[in-house]
Amino acid sequence: MENSDNMVYRLGSGCELSDIVTGNVYEVKVQGFAKFGTFVYLNSHIKGLIHISNVKTEHNEGDKLLVLVRNIRDNGNIDLEEVTIRNYEVSNVACKRPQTRLGDLRSRVGNNVSLDVEIAQIKQTSGPTIFTLIDETGKENAAAFIEAGKRAYPEVELGDIVHVSGEVMMRNDQLQLEVSHMEVLSEEDKNLVLKRIEKALDDRAYPEDLPFMIESEVLEMLKPAMKDVAFHIRKAIFTNQPVILRHHADADGIVAAVSVERAITSLIRDEGGDPDLESHLFKRAPSKAPFYEIEDVTRDLDYALKDNIKYGQKLPLILMMDNGSTEEDEPSYRMAKVYDLTILVVDHHHPDESTDAFLTAHVNPYHVGGDFGVTAGMLGAELARMIYPPVEESIRHFPAVAAVGDRSEAPERAKYLQLVEDTYSEDDCKDIALALDYEQFWLRFNDGREIVKDILNLNDNTGRHKRLVSLLVAEANLAIKEQIETSMPHVERSVLENDARLFTIDVEIYAHRFTFPPPGKTSGEIHDILCKENEGSPVVTLGVGPDFAVIRSRGVLMNIPRMVRELREEIIGGGVNGGGHLVVGSIKFVEGMRDTVIAGLIEKIGKFPIE
Amino acid sequence: MENSDNMVYRLGSGCELSDIVTGNVYEVKVQGFAKFGTFVYLNSHIKGLIHISNVKTEHNEGDKLLVLVRNIRDNGNIDLEEVTIRNYEVSNVACKRPQTRLGDLRSRVGNNVSLDVEIAQIKQTSGPTIFTLIDETGKENAAAFIEAGKRAYPEVELGDIVHVSGEVMMRNDQLQLEVSHMEVLSEEDKNLVLKRIEKALDDRAYPEDLPFMIESEVLEMLKPAMKDVAFHIRKAIFTNQPVILRHHADADGIVAAVSVERAITSLIRDEGGDPDLESHLFKRAPSKAPFYEIEDVTRDLDYALKDNIKYGQKLPLILMMDNGSTEEDEPSYRMAKVYDLTILVVDHHHPDESTDAFLTAHVNPYHVGGDFGVTAGMLGAELARMIYPPVEESIRHFPAVAAVGDRSEAPERAKYLQLVEDTYSEDDCKDIALALDYEQFWLRFNDGREIVKDILNLNDNTGRHKRLVSLLVAEANLAIKEQIETSMPHVERSVLENDARLFTIDVEIYAHRFTFPPPGKTSGEIHDILCKENEGSPVVTLGVGPDFAVIRSRGVLMNIPRMVRELREEIIGGGVNGGGHLVVGSIKFVEGMRDTVIAGLIEKIGKFPIE
Amino acid sequence: MENSDNMVYRLGSGCELSDIVTGNVYEVKVQGFAKFGTFVYLNSHIKGLIHISNVKTEHNEGDKLLVLVRNIRDNGNIDLEEVTIRNYEVSNVACKRPQTRLGDLRSRVGNNVSLDVEIAQIKQTSGPTIFTLIDETGKENAAAFIEAGKRAYPEVELGDIVHVSGEVMMRNDQLQLEVSHMEVLSEEDKNLVLKRIEKALDDRAYPEDLPFMIESEVLEMLKPAMKDVAFHIRKAIFTNQPVILRHHADADGIVAAVSVERAITSLIRDEGGDPDLESHLFKRAPSKAPFYEIEDVTRDLDYALKDNIKYGQKLPLILMMDNGSTEEDEPSYRMAKVYDLTILVVDHHHPDESTDAFLTAHVNPYHVGGDFGVTAGMLGAELARMIYPPVEESIRHFPAVAAVGDRSEAPERAKYLQLVEDTYSEDDCKDIALALDYEQFWLRFNDGREIVKDILNLNDNTGRHKRLVSLLVAEANLAIKEQIETSMPHVERSVLENDARLFTIDVEIYAHRFTFPPPGKTSGEIHDILCKENEGSPVVTLGVGPDFAVIRSRGVLMNIPRMVRELREEIIGGGVNGGGHLVVGSIKFVEGMRDTVIAGLIEKIGKFPIE
């Protein structure tokens, strides 16, 4: 039979059986041959048969033909007849039907559905391949199977936008889409879907506008940057991107990080996250150094890249807290940038301008005329509320702990203390801060999650919290007392030409090592005592080790970074490095040049004006 | 209709559908409303319907009503009619039916059962919540499901006593109770059940009365304390409580700990423990220091608290062996006590009285007039038999190894050696002890479980055991020889005013570092040689490091703890600490005061009387 | 009835129900007694009943009887009658039916099959016991169940040859044999099967004969040894034996090891390996020292033995690369040999003859008149092609990187560089080598698998590879520059009696510590500079630390091993050790004898002739 009508249809990949019209002519592709006829594809996944009696021409696998649909049987088989048409027009059948959204799957169990989604994770199991799908309404898993342990749809990659069809099932009490068809969208379709998903996700990720817990000019000015950080974190969670939170291992840094940890893990749980996956999606890691060491970024990358291969996970977003805003972080940032990692910083240390080139968002009071008195812990708690507002109730006291822990003298300190004065006195806050410092020392660089939560009273067990803090404070004070009694008799005293009292203590040979308090804190405690003993005089304390010195001062208009720069130039082969704030910091050098460097340092200190 | 009878029944929570009698009147509670009538609860889990035509009064959710049971349909639906009765008597229907015990579940597959049990673990999976149940007959898992990954029965907590009903199933070849109902018992019921379970568990946990492997007065006197320790360990295993065994990392400590490890893991297996769980229920960890360091308790707590959250596990019981009975352990015990951990000690070091305040049970020969000659390894092997009697056969030779390893001079030494002389000569035992010391050095602080089992001939492969021990002994002796040859020429010799021969060796700069033998053992080996060279004379050997000295002596009536106390007071800023036994011990100080401290120490040693 | 025929059959264990002939007489063994008769075994797993009416004599469990088969019912029950025959002949029924091979299981799903196989792994799960079976055609898993968590067929051990029957199933999309019967073969049958399997496996494992990537006499002579190593590795993979690859942590060692890693993991995947198991079957571990330290072998054994227990895995094969051919490795080899581990070495360091006693195969250019210029990386890449030929494409540039990294001056260097000159210039190769060294320093002793693959451009992302290498090279050069600027001013210069220029630098106190470059590389960099400054003169550079010195030299005919031996003898209590090549090496000593040893060393150096 030669068809007289000249309209030929081309069936789009979104089309289903019910979109095929009996009597119409379709362009098809030969799939294969059987004794009784030829199988052809009507689109990427619908197959029909031309019975041998209806085959008109010879053809090979892959050839394009025209066929007339004679009948669609109840069992879904399609009877076709080959036709030849000399001149014809082609009409693309797009079948853009209303699609399901992931958020609706739960109500569609047992049904076949079609969706356009983004691929957020691809995990190969020893059975099927598991794809994690996301769209603007949520995330769900889809299982696709070709052969045990073999990757299904190998052309589909992490981050692709795909059209997927399949049946919604419950397997082991879990919702799962059993994939019958998956296909990467064309560039054009992709952009439409991506725009739709991204727009909706961006809207969801954008934090709501909450007032801060206290009134603060600095915080108000930081709000846009904080919202930006909150936005990126929320979006990471909505799109199954892991977050690595690196932070300074002191009380302020811990408080900042635990605020955000609490908000993130709550949000993951609210999003219906698999509890087994939680630890894959969020990791908090205290840093050994007060910056992002190359060793740290190396370990983070090593694990992230292995997880990327093993679990098909996205590469992580890096969040630095109470850390991360200075030149010292840049070598590590350069490594992270080779892998295009997004880096966010929430810090209250004096930032170096050059560092911003690596950062997607950066909250820092110095950007708006504030200073380190607005501590990372304050910023962290307010940020946590932006990420997940209900977190507020449990962390209201965190900024007060951070304030006293970091000896903030900013006006925010009093306000945050006042906010919780009914439940936590200033002394309570100081105790919590000291307990955090002491416990973190013994935790080394583990997060100690549950112990830390008890110290911060996050575990709904105030009795235990109180017993724990009071024990840790007692032990810390005992250890400090022992250290001071050992070191104090060895302090060397002199008066500099600017009339500053200089105190030097060798913290390597006149202090207990590898125990609490460590050299930096030992120097600080000694300095505090000497300041009291020398009320009214300018005081400089040097805690000297074999290849470093810790500098603490009061009443001397020092500039430590400048001294370090000068000594580095003046002392050839000294290997001088270091820095810090203007009047508190540290200096490093090679052991063999210690006397020369210390002498040079003292000479310079003696020349600064006193207050 | 107004009911004339005045008896109203109140259905207990243990009651099932079949306990409801048609025609009786029950007190019920309004659950909710539908177009066609009102749903009410007859007890905590049985629901019935008052059809709208049978509703008599207006009411709100939670109101109490009286209803007459009109009909119970085949599908379980209950038709009710509201009634009002002016005066009535209430009769509680308790439905105390014969309950199933966990030990009988295996024979009830496919049936519905009811049990009163204790909750021993609650693990949230990505599907159902898994509750581990225990009663006096055993433990089994129960699965409860509300929504994927959501905690079922969130009001039920670890340690609660509950009434649970459900169907006994086999899932993946494992017995499992599929929970249809779970309810925390009232305080009154709870105490009854708890008493029943606890009493039965206590009876099971109490160890049987076995004679010791040898005759020993000291052991006989220690028997009650040993039984007490065995009881607590057995009970922990029966109730799914993890055990952490911390021990001294020398031959005696290893032998003690491996005895108990063997007994515990055998008992766990006998109890039908899931092999995947074994490593969650028992951990053996050699300690770096000869006491429970804060760093160790911190790590133990960090992991235990995380497992408590992640796997819903109980907090662990701590067992200290060849360690744990002195003041130095107390800071760590104070930490453990914040979390109410049970601590057991089996030690043969001289105990400090104050330490007992932290301990639930403590075995120590000094408590009964014995001394360190009854070593931890002897105590451990006998304890292991109390925990799991069949263990004896494989560990009979352990006490002999411990005896020679710790140089016991107690009468028990000869008896334990005699016990196994047919299979292990005294030299064999010495070789095993040296092999343990050497291997543990390279294992650092890993347990090296299987290698250690081979050294101790626990792996049914005597050929391999012999080859391994003989190799390790050869390597150890080679290393000792090299160390002695290097150090001996640098020994400084003098004679003290009490005529003691004093030998001093700087083990930091005149010995190989970071290799076997470490400084303490190096000092000991040198001391042994010098004792032989100076047969008949009093000998004191000091192995001196930058901030410590090891003291070994023979024939001098020293009191090391007293010297340490005095030096601590006399040398201001010396940071002196330490202790040990009377004549063997160590002293620590800050590096800068080394010469002063050593001079002070030698002066004091010279004043002690000689034997 | 007394049987007149005198033929009695004995049914072999391979026989099934259908092999039994009604009317025949069989020798059987009494299994047990019931009211209605006696059960007997016809072979190890077929049971029949002698009805009480057909029992003729009294007997006990285990007795042997003769029975006549009266009837085999449709349900498989066998009705027997006891008979007595005075004189009879026995005929063994072997039932050697055509067996299935593992490679055919996929086509037999749903069928019962019988196979003779080797047991390659036995993992006890909390449900069934999983046996991994291998034969000459592949490997598959079989599940056997008796009771949850209990070991099925406990008499079957790792490495046994068994006859197994069961049904082929798909479980969770994975092929699995559900075992109905498993039996260890008799010694005779075992040897037949083993021979068959081993022969086929050996044939498969033997590498095909490929030409090398370049022409090289040394490589040609090494071919048999390389094939031998490839053979053992391939066979390990085919038989589920884990491989541990230990290697030198420098560019040449990494290149060598990653070549083989790539070949092995590709082959495992081709063999259909479970992706979850991959990390159990192969581990690459960079070594801290340039030899196999006791601490390393201890850790390797600790893990291997635990995996052997936990996962029922075979003990591993050890492959050493760019390491492993000297006396220093022997203590570790002695440990490995206690466990009969197979050890293979691919090294280009000068081998000690005694070491070969421990090795199953050893590739070393010195064996065939070559030297270290044929580097481990060259050998490793060629070996990788023997293990898995398609690997060549991605690793063609590896030998060139190894060549420049190890400063090879062999003719192979130029050829390998030429091979890839279109894609990698010599400078590119140098950059990659430096990037590997720098990155490995920060990875410490982790394998950093994915980062290392990026450095080596194995991840199909050349852009990222280039950015990463160029960043690492820049950072490495910056760090080297800083170190040189610090150290150079402290170099002490003198001229020895043989006119060699001696340069000494204390790398402990005049260099940055714990950072890149480490002391050895620092000394090397300084030496390179001094060589240039002293063009034409013989140069010796000593990098001295507290208890070691690194020796580099040019133009002096030194023999470092001899100097070390002499100093060890001459300096009593010096603890002198060390070695290396003739003119590049290091020496260790105890700190307190440093001045004496260095003085002795310098005196000796001054006496060597200059070139």
Image: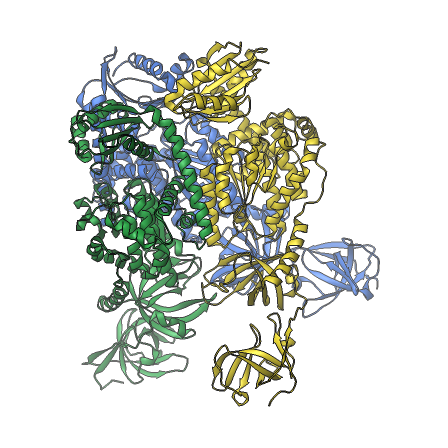
Chain colours: A yellow, B blue, C green
Residue B142 vertical position relative to residue B478 in the rendered view, above or below:
below
Q: Nearer the viewer, residue B370 or B144?
A: B144
x%, y% of residue B57?
84, 58
Placement of B344 over or under C242, stated as above or below = above
Q: Look at the image and tell me whether residue B209 can be seen.
A: no
Quarter of the image where the N terminus of chain C is located: bottom left
Residue C480, located in which quarter of the rendered image? top left
In the image, residue A438 sits, relative to residue C277, either above or below, namely: above
Residue C521 visible in the picture: yes
Q: Residue B80's x, y, as percent?
A: 76, 64
Relative depth, front residue between B333 and C257: C257
Total numbered labels placed on residues in the image: 0
Q: For residue C390, which quarter of the picture? A: bottom left
Where residue A111 appears, x then y in whole percent?
Answer: 63, 69
> At which x and y percent is residue B162?
59, 51
- Which quadrant: the C terminus of chain C? top left
Q: Is residue B312 left or right of residue C214?
A: right
